[in-house]
Image: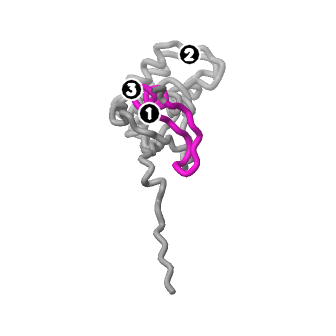
Amino acid sequence: MEIQENIVNKVAQSGLVTVDLANYAPKEEIVVYDIKDNLFHGLILKEKDFRTFIKEHDWSQYQNKHIGIICSTDAIVPTWAYMLLANTLEPFAVSVHFGDKDTVWNSLFSQALDEIDFKQYQDERVVVKGCGEIYIPESAFIKFTLGLSKVVKSIMYGEPCSTVPVYKRKL
């Protein structure tokens, strides 16, 4: 006697919408430019030397990259130096920021999330995917949740088969 069982994918039938925030991660490389390398004796920035460096340096290595500008030493760097660097990098870089790699990563996530039309999730039950292969800053989860909670029925965190409830609209 042959027994036939129908396997039912209850997750697929649940009507849940899964969102992976990794889809909003920057695709281009993030590079940090440390102005400390331009300091005289690691302490002071000489304007004339810095301007010569700006003219002679090969900036094409920053082509199509996100750039973070920092000074990792305790030197006092004049604001105009950061401005000059930003202006010089801008034609090559995808974007230029003040901050380290994590700061740039967080900023780029924030910018990507700003462009989401949350109305596409109107009255949906959304699962925000938890684990993934790339780091997603907590700030991205917070920003996404705040935008989502204005339009959805519910928000869960995790995987569709194992979620943690985050938000449920009051009826």
Q: Residue at x 38, y 34 (%)?
A: 123
Question: What residue is disc 2 on?
Answer: 77
Residue 88's mark? Answer: 3
Task: Indicate the amino acid at tag 2.
Answer: Val
Tell which of 28 and 87 is nearer to you: 28
Q: Amino acid at mark 3?
A: Thr
**Disc with the residue nearer the chain's start (1 vs 3):** 3
Q: Position of residue 70 (x, y in %)?
A: 55, 25
Q: Which residues are magenta?
A: 144-168
Left or right of 57 in this view: 158: right
Spot occupied by residue 113 in the image (x, y as percentages of width and height):
42, 31
Sequence-first tag of 1 and 2: 2
Callout 1 touching callout 3 (CB < 8 Å): no
* Residue at 43% in and 27% down: 147
Answer above or below: position of 48 versus 57.
above
Cα distance in 3D space between marks 1 and 2: 50 Å
Q: CA distance from mark 1 to mark 3?
A: 47 Å
**Residue 7 x %, y %:** 48, 67
Q: CA distance from mark 3 to mark 2?
A: 17 Å
Helix, strand or loop under label 1: loop
- Circle 3: element type: helix
Closer to the chain start, of discs 3 and 2, is: 2
Q: Which residue is mark 1?
A: 153
